Amino acid sequence: MSLSTALLTDRYELTMLDAALRDGTAHRRCVFELFGRRLSGGRRFGVVAGTGRLLSLLRDFRFGDDELRFLRDGRVVDAATLAFLEGYRFTGSITGYREGELYFPGSPLLTIEGTFAEAVVLETLALSVLNHDSAVATAAARMSVAAGDRPLAEMGSRRAGESSAVAAARAAYIAGFGATSNLEAGRRWGIPTMGTAAHSWTLLHDTEEDAFRAQIAALGIDTTLLVDTYDIRTGVDTAIRVAGTGLGGVRIDSGDLPTVAAQVREQLDGLGATATRITVTSDLDEHAIAALAASPVDAYGVGTSVVTGSGTPTAGMVYKLVARQDAAGGWVGVAKASTDKASKGGRKAAFRTLEAGTATSELIVVSDGFEELETAAAHPDARSLQVALVVEGEVDAAHEGPTGVAAARAHHLRVREELPVKALALSRSDPAIPTVYVDAGPGR
């Protein structure tokens, strides 16, 4: 039985709903938009992640007896609002960027259309999912770019909350990692899992040689032996003596990795183990991975940095009302004018302009009059970025589960090829392409 997600919500969402039901504005049709004002951490691009998770959580956004009892006992809302929440179902529509898509400042990542009552209560859940997952995916994409063709494994479960760890593994896989150590992520999302032994395995045995022999007996010679529990050079010698030159790999988790990797490669080759792979771990981030580009490393394992967004644990996205019906039923665009927090009113259609297959701008067409939104046909030199995710309350299941994850990963790897070369640099900078707003309709 699924658990309700309805109370994964800030209290003020429900107090606004309570007041709106009282004054009659709760049933006004509204358009909310989820976007980022800027790219956090001076990143040059962002990666959308969490969309499929959010859609599944939306299915369970229901107020059951336990949830209603909590709200009643805490006097959060009045009886009329409790009655409304008892029958709550989102019957509106959501369009947005495909999961795995790149984004830039102002990109309308989600557009939620429905009554104020239906849409306002989704704010906290939508932001908590996309802010976390997109931050992880953006960091993971930078690491994937730095790693090039060398495989990456996500190993950060012990550095995150238990639920966040599963979500982070999913986001990292979408953005280019090839495997995770987290078994629940493997079960739930179809991500390949990996892992052999920790230092405690070696310490458990009387000698390092005993530990290696036992591991090989259990897992075969294609396993990866952790060689730095004691002395790395001795560990490599022991590993090859026990396993032979057909040993699958060794893992190094400490030391000056560029220097140590070169020494281990030379030692392995000298012992005849020329095909034995070297995996490095030890607090890697995108900058450390880039520094190892010229080193004889075959694979990377990344933990803390990827699950915490490599120093940027949130994508800084916001959820704002951008249009609503007025008392007469006409549509009006609305926007904040707050200093450094201004928003852009109106419904939006988003396109990525391309020149010879390379992205040149994020083109956002703004409709204040709510005429039909522009389609790709109006922009032959651009790629349309938005797809239908929920139509009249019905979730498109293609974005959920392992199938949705695989599709998001494939989409990300494909669209990442559109980035200009300057976007691949790891230094802090302005977004790789500009965001350009134009008004829809005649004379624009």
Image (spheres, grey):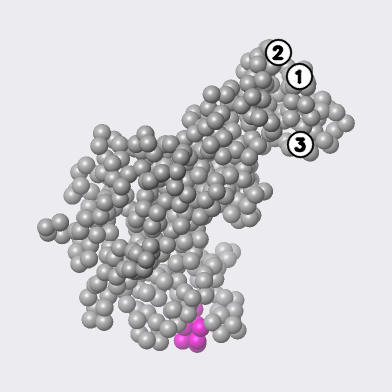
Q: Is residue 239 magenta?
A: no
Residue at 20%, 47% in the rendered image: 379
In the displayed structure image, the side of residue 206 where residue 345 appears, left or right: left
Residue pointed to by mark 2 = 271
Q: Which residues are magenta?
A: 77-86
Image quarter (top left, top right, bottom left or bottom right) of the N terminus: bottom right
Asked which quadrant contains residue 115, the reply is: bottom left
Q: Residue furthest left?
A: 443
Q: Residue furthest right?
A: 206
Locate residue 190, reporting x and y percent. Answer: 54, 44
Residue sitting nearer the eye, 33 or 119:
33
Q: Earlier in the sequence, mark 3 or mark 2?
A: 3
Query: Callout 2: helix, strand or loop?
Result: loop
Query: Callout 1: helix, strand or loop?
Result: helix
In the depicted structure, whether residue 114 falls above or below residue 185: below
Q: Is residue 188 among the parts visible in the rendering? A: no
Locate residue 311, reporting x and y percent. Answer: 55, 48
In the displayed structure image, the side of residue 54 where residue 423 appears, left or right: left
Q: Which mark is residue 155?
A: none
Residue sitting nearer the eye, 114 or 25:
25
Q: How many marks?
A: 3
- Asked whether disc 2 touches disc 1, contact meaning CB atoms under 8 Å apart, the reply is yes
Q: Amino acid at mark 2?
A: Leu
Residue pointed to by mark 3 = 199
Residue at 60%, 84% in the rendered image: 73
Residue at 38%, 57% in the rendered image: 37
In the displayed structure image, the side of residue 88 where residue 442 appears, left or right: left
In the depicted structure, whether residue 123 falls above or below residue 133: below
Residue pointed to by mark 1 = 237
Is most of the magenta stretch helix, strand or loop? Answer: helix
Locate residue 240, reporting x and y percent. Answer: 74, 19
